[in-house]
Amino acid sequence: MKLNIAYPQTGCQKLIDIDDERRLQGFFDKRISAEVPADSLGDEWKGYRFRITGGNDKQGFPMKQGVLTNGRVRLLLSKGHSCYRPRRAGERKRKSVRGCIVDAAMSVLSLVVVQKGEQEIPGLTDKTVPRRLGPKRVGKIRKLFNLEKADDVRQYVVRRPLPEKEGKPKRKPKAPKIQRLITPVVLQRKRHRAALKKTHAAKSNEAAASYQKLLAQRQKEAREKRHERQQRRRRLTSATHSTST
């Protein structure tokens, strides 16, 4: 079985091949997201702890979280499910996936180091791979450079130099568009939305008041008409009684 071990703090990952199943006994019958001590892999891994993040069996079918079996099943998958990418809107497809329990039939197991041990692992913990891209969000840029709220975040954006081409002038470095940046234009738009909301509220209140006024007027007219009909009916009845007597 191959173990694909990643160490997020350095950005490195290492693939090791282990043929002795006795060294892999600690991973068997464990689920995805379970933490496993790595002491059984050898003395150089003493003190390390891994978290299982996934894997593939010998036929290439991926493990799926939530399928509590160590075998293969066929599930009807749609948009939002792991192990499936829809090609059309609303598309669903029945696909074979492997359960989230590890056994000896696995070909590759993906692991993440959650606790570092005593010794350094060559190619995993002894070097650092620089990040290709820097943060985009304002809060994350402030957190990275320990900035105050009054500091201009735009001066601290991580710019990526572009490779030069022969016969063309030097290209400018590429910078990301800062997300959630508060600028005067953003504040102006916010004030505009608030003013529109206030205008719509005043307009709706005015329309409601005029409607209530019109409704009260119509109800008053209806009451007056009804009162006139009653008075006319009473006069007619009194007139018939007087002629009959």
Image (cartoon, rainbow, N blue to C red):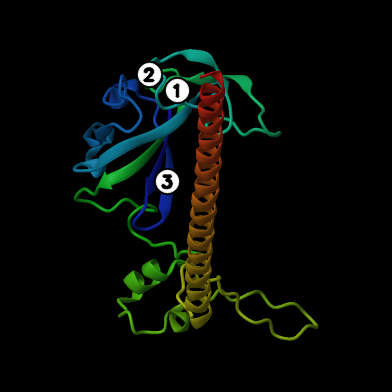
Q: What secondary structure is found at the residue carrying circle 2?
A: loop
Q: Position of residue 235 (x, y in %)?
A: 53, 33
Q: Position of residue 84 (x, y in %)?
A: 58, 30
**Structural crowding at the residue carrying mark 3, measured as other residues with C-alpha within 10 Å and reported as few (<14), some (14–19) or many (≥20):** some
Amino acid on which the number 1 mark rests in the picture: Met
Amino acid on which the number 3 mark rests in the picture: Lys
In three-dimensional space, the C-alpha distance between marks 3 and 1, rounded to whole angstroms, equals 18 Å
Which residue shows up at 43% across the image and 80% down it? 156
Q: What secondary structure is found at the residue carrying circle 1?
A: strand
* Quarter in which the N terminus is drawn: top left
Q: Nearer the viewer, mark 3 or mark 2?
A: 2
In the foreground, 227 or 238: 238
Residue found at the very far right of the displayed protein: 167
In three-dimensional space, the C-alpha distance between marks 1 and 2, rounded to whole angstroms, equals 6 Å
Q: Position of residue 96 (x, y in %)?
A: 56, 18
Specify whether 105 is left or right of 29: right
**Residue 94 lies in what quarter of the image?**
top right
Which residue shows up at 39% across the image and 62% down it? 128
Residue linked to disc 2: 103
Q: Dots 3 and 2: beta carbons under 8 Å? A: no
Residue linked to disc 1: 106
Q: Dots 3 and 1: beta carbons under 8 Å? A: no
Residue linked to disc 3: 14
In the foreground, 171 or 205: 205
